[in-house]
Every structure is written in structure tokens, then in C-alpha cells.
Image (cartoon, rainbow, N blue to C red):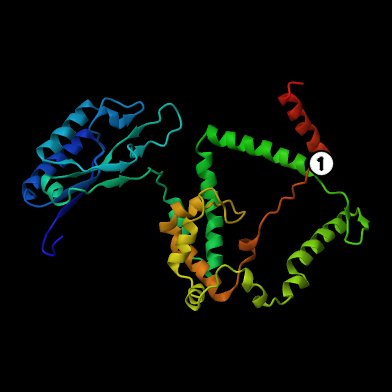
């Protein structure tokens, strides 16, 4: 676009009542006369649909509203800008039989815009429920290091999310029932899979629960923090097997300081259903709320790389010990499989 070339962009928020929207159609017709020689784009929430296929669900009589909408944009000389993404842009957030979807948001252009930007289009994202509570809570001032502030705000958000889940009616009840069944199953599993005795490295058997726990801790301390980790290794002996030795330039790249873009890229590279820790927040939450939480989360991560300090609640994790099945338990199903395949 040339430096001296102008375009006009009009943002629309249509009234909820049909009679009140008529002022909007009149205003667009007036603007159209002023924009006849200039690329003009009109976009926003028109609060009206152009056709019945833009409504899904039980709705009232919208024929008059649709006719007036089409007549208004036709008189203004506006045409739809090509769209990609979600067809419906609004939902009444109901989980009952009165669930309703509509396409109320769109972008329209005049012929001058089409001639100047023939390949332009817009992308319609998935509609989300608007709720200002999480935003307000996140903006509360918390005194402390960045990582502490993030963890406190995440904890403060949980009651809000719990309240939202309770407001969804039967869905919440089903979730709670499923959680109860899961808790019972896990409790039963813990009882059935409890380790009642263990042999130490010298072959002695311990049955006291405290001694059993001590042996587990000692084993992993020796495994992860024993003398083997302090043994020096001469890298010259590894070079014959190395396919590629990094150059000085590559080594310098590895030593570059972590940037805010690096933090965001690392977060968005994590699959949506993955959780960085046991606090219940998946990476999908951080991606969706990044415009709100991204700045503080990034500051907390960069603070860690600067100070090397990591809060206890951040580095906590959950370990689940899964017993290894015995060979004789597997032999019978495998034998039965071969017998079935032979027709015996």
C-alpha cells in the first residue's frame, strides 16, 4: 500500500432489538456514499443473520430482521469478505434443548476494497464464554518474586473455575460421580497394591512400613544422587563414536540467554492435554489465556533462569509405581491365543 493511500474501517456493534438496528442500516447507507472511492471495510457483531442456515437451534421468528439486514448491506454496496474457520460465531452457552448457535459476527467490504486487496480474507475463531472474573483475579497485586505471584494467582483462579463448573448443571454432577468412582477405584488399587515388605541391597527383608519407605528413598537417592554422578569422564574417549561435534558457533548458541519468545515457543510446543505439574492446569489453559497470563508466566520463567531458584510447589510431582506382571501371569493368555488361532 502506498504511503499516501487511505482506507476506512468501520467497527460495528449491532443493537439487540430489530427496531434499534434500523439506525445502523441507515448509518451504513450514509457512510457508503462517503466511501464510494475509498477501500472500505465494515466488521463486528451485527446481531443479525443473513440467512436461516446461519442459525442452529430453536429461535424465534427472524425473517423480518434478516430481510432488513440484507436490504441494508445491499443498499450500502457491501459484500462478504471471504472467511475461514468457524461458521457460527455466537452460542447462548446453554446445555439444554434450547442450545442456540448463530453467525452474528462478520466482515463486509465494498468493491474498492476488493479491487485493492483481492486476496484478503479473515479467520473466524472458536467462540468462547465471556467471563471477566478470571481476568480480574489475575490482575490482583501480589507481593513476592514472579514465580510466587504466578502460583498464588493460579491457586486463586481455582474457586472461580469450580463455580463455573457447578453452574453447568448435570454435567458437573456426572463429573463428580465419575471422580467419586475413580477415587474409590484408586483407593482400592492402593490397598491391593500396597508393598508390605522389601529386600534391601544386602538381602535383608524389611516389613515395617517406615523401613520399607526408607529403602525406597535410599534406593533412589543412590540412583539419582550417588557417587556415579560425580565420576569424571574424559570426553576424548567418546569422540570416535560421535557423529557430529558441535562447533564453537553452535556452542555459543547454546549459551545464549533465554528470551521471552523462547518461553512462549516452549509453552506452545507442548501438547494441549499435557500438564506441567500436578496443579491441574494443562498447557491448553496457558495457551488460551496467554494474552492475560503470558507476561507474568514469562517473567517467572526468566527469573528462574536468572536466579536458579525454584519454588517447592513448582517442582513437586507425582510418582505412581506400577507393579511388573509375573511371567506366569502372561503365559496363559498367550498360550490361549495360539490355541484359538489353531482352532483347538
Q: Relative to the observer, which residue lies in front, 96 or 313?
A: 313
Query: To which residue does mark 1 refer?
Result: 327
Which residue is outermost to the right?
Answer: 204
Examine the rendered structure and indicate whether residue 307 appears above or below residue 24.
Answer: below
Task: State the residue in front, 127 or 48.
Answer: 127
Image height of 121 relative to 225, above or below:
above
**In this image, 219 relative to 207: left or right?**
left
Q: Residue at x 65, y 76 (%)?
A: 235
Residue 93 vertical position relative to residue 123 in the rendered view, above or below: above
Q: Secondary structure at mark 1?
A: helix
- Horizontal and vertical percent position of residue 91: 37, 37
Q: Which of 183 and 37 lies nearest the eye of the viewer?
A: 37
For this rendering, which residue is in front, 289 or 247? Answer: 247
Q: Residue at x 60, y 56 (%)?
A: 277
- Left or right of 237 on screen, residue 33: left
Q: Residue at x 77, y 21 (%)?
A: 344
Q: From the image, which quarter does the N terminus lie in?
A: bottom left
Looking at the picture, how far across and down is residue 107, in whole percent?
23, 44
- Expressed as whole percent of the image width and height from the top left, the position of residue 196 reads 87, 49
Is residue 140 among what the camera can see? no
The image quarter containing residue 100 is top left
- Looking at the rendered structure, the number of numbered marks drawn on it comes to 1
Give the percent coordinates (x, y) of residue 229: 73, 71
Question: Residue 15 appears in which quarter of the rendering?
Answer: top left
Most extreme residue toward the front is 240
Which image quadrant for residue 17? top left
| Left or right: residue 88 compared with residue 51 | right
Regarding residue 194, the answer to whether it shows in the image is: yes
Q: Residues within 10 Å of mark 1 (few under 14, many from 20)?
A: few
Amino acid at each position: 500500500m502506498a504511503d499516501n493511500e487511505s482506507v476506512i474501517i468501520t467497527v460495528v456493534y449491532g443493537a439487540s432489538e430489530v427496531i434499534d438496528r434500523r439506525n445502523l442500516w441507515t448509518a451504513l447507507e450514509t457512510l457508503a456514499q462517503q466511501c464510494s472511492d475509498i477501500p472500505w471495510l465494515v466488521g463486528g457483531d451485527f446481531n443479525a443473520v443473513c440467512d436461516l442456515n446461519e442459525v442452529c437451534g430453536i429461535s424465534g421468528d427472524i425473517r423480518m430482521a434478516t430481510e432488513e439486514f440484507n436490504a441494508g448491506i445491499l443498499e450500502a454496496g457491501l459484500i462478504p469478505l471471504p472467511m475461514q474457520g468457524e461458521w457460527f460465531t455466537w452460542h447462548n452457552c446453554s446445555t439444554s434443548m434450547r442450545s442456540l448457535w448463530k453467525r452474528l459476527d462478520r466482515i463486509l467490504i465494498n468493491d474498492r476494497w476488493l479491487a485493492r486487496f483481492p486476496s484478503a480474507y479473515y479467520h473466524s475463531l472458536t467462540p468462547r464464554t465471556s467471563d471477566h472474573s478470571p481476568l480480574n483475579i489475575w490482575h490482583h497485586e501480589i507481593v513476592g518474586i514472579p514465580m510466587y505471584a504466578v502460583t498464588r494467582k493460579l491457586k486463586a483462579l481455582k474457586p472461580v473455575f469450580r463455580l463455573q463448573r457447578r453452574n453447568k448443571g448435570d454435567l458437573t454432577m456426572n463429573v463428580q460421580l465419575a471422580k467419586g468412582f475413580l477415587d474409590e477405584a484408586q483407593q482400592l488399587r492402593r490397598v491391593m497394591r500396597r508393598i508390605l515388605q522389601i529386600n534391601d541391597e544386602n538381602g535383608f527383608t524389611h516389613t515395617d512400613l517406615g523401613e520399607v519407605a526408607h529403602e525406597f528413598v535410599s534406593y533412589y537417592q543412590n540412583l539419582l544422587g550417588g557417587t556415579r554422578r560425580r565420576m569424571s569422564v574424559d570426553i576424548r574417549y567418546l569422540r570416535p563414536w560421535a557423529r557430529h561435534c558441535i562447533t564453537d558457533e553452535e556452542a555459543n548458541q547454546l549459551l545464549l540467554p533465554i528470551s521471552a519468545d523462547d518461553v512462549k515457543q516452549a509453552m506452545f510446543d507442548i501438547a494441549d492435554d499435557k500438564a506441567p505439574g500436578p496443579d491441574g492446569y494443562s498447557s491448553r489453559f496457558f495457551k488460551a489465556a496467554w494474552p492475560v497470563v503470558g507476561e507474568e508466566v514469562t517473567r517467572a520463567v526468566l527469573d528462574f533462569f536468572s536466579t536458579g531458584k525454584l519454588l517447592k510447589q513448582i517442582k513437586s510431582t507425582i510418582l505412581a509405581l506400577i507393579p511388573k506382571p509375573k511371567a506366569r501371569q502372561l503365559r496363559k493368555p498367550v498360550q490361549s491365543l495360539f490355541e484359538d488361532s489353531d482352532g483347538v
